Image (cartoon, rainbow, N blue to C red):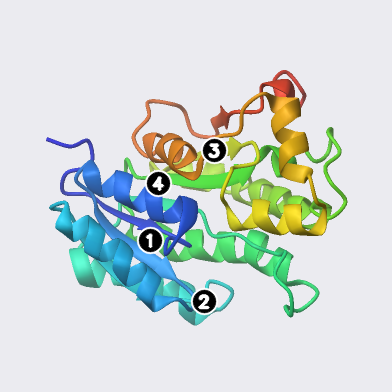
Amino acid sequence: MGLLDNKTAIVTGSSRGIGADVAKYLAAEGANVVVNYRQKAPRANRVVTEIEAAGGRAAAVGADLTTQDGVQALASAAMENFGSLDVLVLNASGGMETGMEADYALKLNRDAQVSMLNAAVPLMPEGSRVVFVTSHQAHFIDTVPTMPEYEPVARSKRAGEDALRELIPSLAEKGISLVVVSGDMIEGTITATLLDRSSPGAIEARRAEAGKLYSVSEFAAEVAKMATAEVGTGHTEYVGGADYFGKSAS
């Protein structure tokens, strides 16, 4: 018996990287998983195929989370495909892509997170869990400087975390808990690749400072654990980056 048997999870931004591995870990615990993508349907379909090949259940759903239609479609997909929604993993993020509007980072990392949560909450029963995925560089941005290239994204993600935390009392009234998972720079993510491209040597420098950087799979496993961890609402789970510990951030 898995910890998530007969439960359904939505994982935003799960066609690749951390989100894809989180989806697979949750499916391995018995969850039905809604795999979300914005444009790359073949990638999302491959994640679904891998889950199904391992005996799990999943569905790929295309949705742009910066639109109200997108968040509503994604929330509805859980009910339409599996009849429930018990876990929401807010993993999708961005802001370093080229060719996007100036306020795209804030639209995705703050506004879309709140919109997705608000669309999901009416469908989630008491005991449900929301997991927000962020980075140390964003979580600690008010007390610990980060690379200039990443600062706008970091501030938008911190704004998203703050906006979600403001909803904790209303979530608690419904018996829904919110947990934040903050990780150091993760080897192999698109963000790390873009950072290293704009600031050559950034990954190696951070690895030297931290002593170890988690892989995508390692970090995803920690995120997935928080879907069922016995922690209180508002808890922050820190993954890696020991040199950040003890620094003030709520």
Residue drawn at 13 percent across, 53 percent down: 55
Quadrant of the image for the N terminus? top left
Q: Which of the two marks, 4 or 2, is nearer to us in this view? A: 2
Residue position marked by numbered label 1 in the rendering: 122
Side of 63 where 184 appears, left or right:
right
How much space separates mark 4 and mark 2, taking CA atoms? 27 Å
Name which residue type carries label 3.
Val
How much space separates mark 4 and mark 3, taking CA atoms? 22 Å
| Label 4 crowd (10 A; few <14 / some 14-19 / many >=20) | some
Q: Earlier in the sequence, mark 4 or mark 3?
A: 4
Residue 139, percent across and down? 70, 39
Q: Earlier in the sequence, mark 3 or mark 1?
A: 1
How much space separates mark 3 and mark 2, taking CA atoms? 23 Å
Residue drawn at 56 percent across, 49 percent down: 188
Q: Contact, CB < 8 Å: mark 1 with mark 4?
A: no
How much space separates mark 2 and mark 1, taking CA atoms? 20 Å
| Closest to the observer, 173 or 203 | 203
Residue 231 found in image quarter: top left
| Label 2 crowd (10 A; few <14 / some 14-19 / many >=20) | many
How many numbered circles are shown?
Answer: 4
Q: Which of the two marks, 4 or 3, is nearer to us in this view? A: 3
| Closest to the observer, 56 or 116 | 56
**Is residue 241 visible to the viewer in this orientation of the structure?**
yes
Q: Which of the two marks, 2 or 1, is nearer to us in this view? A: 2
How much space separates mark 3 and mark 1, taking CA atoms? 23 Å
Disc 4, SS: loop
Residue position marked by numbered label 4 in the rendering: 174
